[in-house]
Image (spheres, rainbow, N blue to C red):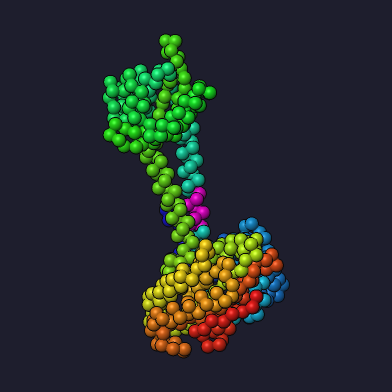
Amino acid sequence: MNPDFSASTQSILIVDNCLDDADRLAVLLTQQGYRVKIVQQGTQALAEVARSELDLILLDIDLPDLNGYDLCQKLKANYNTQEIPVVFISNLDHVLDKVKAFSIGGRDYITKPFHDAEVLARIENQLSIRNALKLLMMQNALLAEEICERQRIERELRLSEEKFAKAFRSNPNSITITKLSDGNHIDANETFCKVTGYSRDEVIGHTAKDLNLWVQTDLRIDLFKHLTMYGVIRNYEFQFRTKSGAIRTALLSAEIITIHGQECLLSLSNDITDRVRAELALQDANEELKRLALLDGLTHVANRRYFNTEIANVWQNLMAKKGFLSLILCDVDHFKRYNDCYGHLAGDGCLKRVAKAIEKVLKEGEIAGVEYMIARYGGEEFAAILPETEIDKALEIAESIREAVEGLKIPHARSLEGSYVTLSLGVVTTIPSEEFSPEALIGVADLALYEAKEQGRNRVMVEKF
């Protein structure tokens, strides 16, 4: 059964002392199908979080009893609430306010007065990330259950082997008895003959080597070494070859027994070929799910969640190496006007082309041994992580990105800067240290992007860090 991640099942808490702003947000979100609750104080918010299952919190900074920063820190310090995404929405527009919001665990920051489309886009992005994480956790739980079930079956199999090791002819597993002195088979049950394709007469008096049964002969040598030392082996996985040449996988249990004074090897094997294939298929499916959870569904570049993970990893790596890290934030100019003019379907196509153009420039500009990464950071906003890259190189790449997107000549009749779709870009470079965090770097890059827009858009601006 697929989980229900529709808007009607998702709850958003608005924590805002300004009732006009809160009511406007509530109407907007309710129209989109979300369940909305409004509180005006931090203590009320804590009480609401304790008794309700929330998917997202819209949090103002200026509250009468407990400021938004302190409330966010309390939520992130609590195991039961630390995963609820917090989006700050505030009148405060200083870069330090934004940096502080991100540093204490805020997922996004929206400045008042806000635009409806921007608020919806940022909220949908955060909820998409949260839904993907929930889905991945559910898949992992199912995988854990399947592994436990498989382990239970294997335990029962071992008990059955110990109890019915000599129930030879009627046993559903393949059983053979061979002389330890020369390895010749002295008996084989019907299952063994059916699985391998050999008749009983073809098996009796011949060794496994004669029949070319073992795919990896070195494993057979190791098996006999173990048997010589311990006299028994349980659930030894190996591959065998049938008479027709097909390769299959089995679990082998064997022990040394005495028959008429002669040491023999009693071997019981369980064909697990289908199970191994199913496990590999499940593993591939889980890996694919993990991969998809890290990609933006529209542009197929990294999503915001992957970006946050990657920049944290790069930050730690370069902090140890004392290497440079550059970050580029870019935004499609007047994208709302583009959507209003051409429609959302055309807008989606525009974002796909822009993402491919940025990805191509980054690939061509990579330094030897270093990989750059592009991510869809927001609705029409993209981010590029450039490890071991100084400011001059970062500016060169940013300008190439700007030219590449403008060179696409995507018509934009309502652009205020020209006739085609363009980008504004903000660039920042630093050497990571423990004094700051990746969130601080993002905040400064966002400031540079803001300056690029203020200076007329379709340009690159750099901000000192």
Picture coordinates of residue 60, whole percent (x, y)? 63, 74
* Viewport quadrant of the C terminus: bottom right
Q: Main secondary structure of the magenta part?
A: helix
Seen in the picture, residue 312 relative to 198 is either above or below; the reply is below
Can see residue 126?
no
Picture coordinates of residue 360, whole percent (x, y)? 44, 71
Seen in the picture, residue 2 relative to 265 is either above or below; the reply is below
Q: Name the residue located 47 percent from the left edge and 56 percent from the top edge.
A: 290
Seen in the picture, residue 404 relative to 51 is either above or below; the reply is below
Seen in the picture, residue 278 relative to 296 is either above or below; the reply is above
Q: Name the residue located 59 percent from the left edge and 61 percent from the top edge.
A: 313
When asked about the image quadrant of residue 317, the answer is bottom right
**Seen from this angle, which residue lies furthest front?**
368
Picture coordinates of residue 79, whole percent (x, y)? 64, 57
**Residue 99 horizontal side relative to residue 417, left or right:** right
**Seen from this angle, which residue lies furthest right?**
65
Q: Name the residue located 46 percent from the left edge and 73 percent from the top edge.
A: 361
Question: Which span is picked out in magenta?
Answer: 134-141
Q: Name the residue located 49 percent from the left edge and 37 percent from the top edge.
A: 151
Does residue 138 show up magenta in the picture?
A: yes
Residues 117 and 436: in front is 436
Does residue 55 show up magenta in the picture?
A: no
